[in-house]
Amino acid sequence: MEVVAVLDRLHGLIDELVAADVAGLDADGLQVLTEGLQREQSRLAVAAADVLAVWEPRGAWRASRARTAGLALGNRVARCHHEMAAEIGRAGKLARMARVRAAVLDGRLSMDHADLICKYVTDARWELFVRDEELLVDTLAGLGLFADGRKVVRYWADHVDDELGATTRPPVSDVSMSRSRDTGEVTVRGSLAPIDGEVFAAELDRLCREVRLEDAAAGVERTAGQRRAAALVRMAARSASSTGVSPRPLFQVIVGDQTMARLCELASGVVVRPHDLLPYLDTGLVESFLFDEQHRLVGVSRQRTFRGRLRRAIQARDRHCQHDSGCPVPATDLVSDVDHIRPWAAGGETSDVNGEVECTAHNRHPHLHGPAKQPKYPAGPYTSDDGGLLQIRQRLRWQIYNDPDDPLNPELPHAL
């Protein structure tokens, strides 16, 4: 390969793109160019990774006396050495991931997918990744949202750790607080573990919305950060006076959903390990939903709006906004609506078949609506088996408490 000639051609093509009259393109041409450049950027990243995977082990960079290869190359090309080190590490892994590499070159996956896989494929998980690589690639390539891919890889990592018998330390909440002696201002820093964060964030979001509505009625203008601070103070005041209700995390266990063998998520869509439920089983809300071709959790409602169990079942099924644009907003009450696919005014019934989740923006602003859609799930027959769902919850509780070493009990293939 004539290296200089290849680089000259690449340089020329980039110059041609930069000089192109992009503003003069019609909508279709601009869309094609935008999507194509993003795909080619991922393909070029694979080519650059192939080079890095050969360049770094040869060690010529050590002649610069730099401490690391990332620092040596970063200094030469005026890039952040931390970013260069990350790309070099990714290149070493990607060189051994033939199917992932091929999928990016074919346009089925992006480099964001490759980075996600590299993040979770540790040395301890490597052998099982080799076994599961084709399945992971095919699953990720078939998803419409990258956010769903992040969940799939996280679930895979949890399954592998269970198979390996690996024990991981659960995330621990850690918050520090300091007060200025001069001004009395309080500074709060730290992070919350996923479940603790769900409890905190759900209540904070609710109070922020409450403050925003009050501000709008009173004509008060505040920034989002100022409203958040006011909500925090309100949360503390209500706790001190014991007038508020302690927020409880909502866990959703989805049974019969074939996307994964085990689904355990917070209501906002954050993936948690089933064993993380142990401290919260007595105080949290655990909802189980059963979906298959013949039976559904709820039937047709005579109400105008989606409420109660019907609403929660649709939220558990859809998990995020179902707008045709591929919107990833989670199916929580504060940011999303459950509405009719075929409008109520046009004879559409209030049922799980005719209901779907859309974020408030896509549902409430007419200019964001897409073309009319048809229900995508088959109709009835319906059953409402509260006893069966109660049994699922009881078996889930028993399994977590009594069989911690075997979270994938063969008797309950889809319960976790």
Image (cartoon, helix red, strand yellow):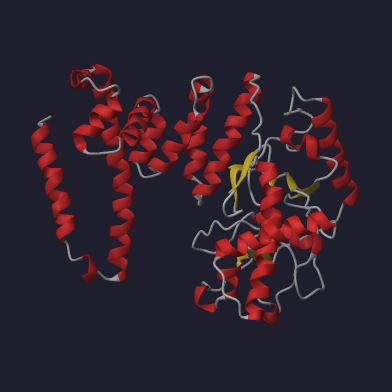
Q: Is residue 11 above or below residue 217?
A: above
Kindly give the residue lying farthest to the right in the view shown: 387
Residue at 28% x, 18% y is: 57
Front residue of 374/68: it is 68
Residue at 47% x, 43% y is: 141
Is residue 164 toward the left or the right of residue 115 in the image?
right
Q: Position of residue 125 (x, y in %)?
A: 53, 23
Quadrant of the frame with the C terminus: top right
Front residue of 291/92: it is 92
Residue at 37% x, 32% y is: 86
Q: Is residue 164 above or below residue 187?
A: above
* Residue 340 seen in this snapshot: no
Count the numbered circles shown.
0
Q: Position of residue 332 (x, y in %)?
A: 67, 58
Q: Residue 412 falls in which quadrant of the image?
A: top right
Is residue 274 toward the left or the right of residue 5 in the image?
right
Quadrant of the frame with the N terminus: top left
Q: Position of residue 59 (x, y in %)?
A: 24, 17
Q: Position of residue 150 (x, y in %)?
A: 53, 42
Kindly give the residue lying farthest to the front in the view shown: 182
* Residue 38 seen in this snapshot: yes
Is residue 180 toward the left or the right of residue 17 in the image?
right
Residue at 80% x, 25% y is: 403
